[in-house]
Amino acid sequence: MSPEKFKAEILPLRERLFHIAWKMLEEKQDAEDAVQEVFLKLWHIRESLGQYESTTAFATTMTKNLCIDKLRGRTYEDSLDDELYRQAGPDNPYLELERKNTGQILRVIIDRLPPLQQAIIRMKDIEEYEVEEIAEITGTQPEAVRMNLSRARKKVREEYIRLTR
């Protein structure tokens, strides 16, 4: 792929990739770093980008995978819900502790899912992607996305019930 074609096809994806990274990482600076890293990787493999059916889907998948790797490397201290409740004012300390524990438990359970189910449940339930978009990003059929989402939710529900009894 020539530098001109790279600029025409890949660089316009910046906003879309940034949005994905920001939704996943929840930090603007981390999202910008992730997108920059993806662009650098794409630049290094620009000669072989022609073999992919959709460079947009490939770039999106690279961004998603990079963000998942960054999230795995993080230690979770606070969730977005915790920040919102803190801003809302004083709360019942027992409810606050329960909310924090629930979030930690759910993250651990989701991290134990198979990689495809992890990605699908995060994209659908956290990033609020549509099933068709998830199918395009993951390279699967919409029916397979629905099935994996159902299985992932069922497993999360069963594990959560088992761990909290």
Image: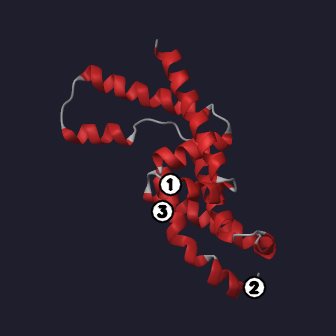
- Residue 109: percent from the left, percent from the top? 56, 29
Q: Residues within 10 Å of mark 1 (few under 14, many from 20)?
A: some
Instruction: Find residue 2 and name its label.
Output: 2
The Cα atoms of the two marked residues, 2 and 3, are separated by 26 Å
Crowding at dot 3, Cα within 10 Å, few <14 / some 14-19 / many 20+, comes out as some
Q: Amino acid at mark 2?
A: Ser
Give the Cα separation between the discs numbered 3 and 1.
12 Å
Q: Residue at x 33, y 23 (%)?
A: 97
Badge 2: residue crowd in 10 Å (few <14, some 14–19, many ≥20): few
Q: Which one is earlier in the sequence, the residue at label 2 or at label 1? A: 2
Label 1 sits on a secondary structure element that is loop
**Mark 2 or 3 closer to N-term?**
2
- Considering depth in this image, is 58 or 142 the residue closer to the camera? 142
Q: Tell me which amino acid carries mark 1.
A: Tyr
The image quarter containing residue 60 is: bottom right
* Residue 129 circle label: 1
Image-based side of 28 in relation to 84, left or right: right
Q: Label 3, on which residue?
A: 19
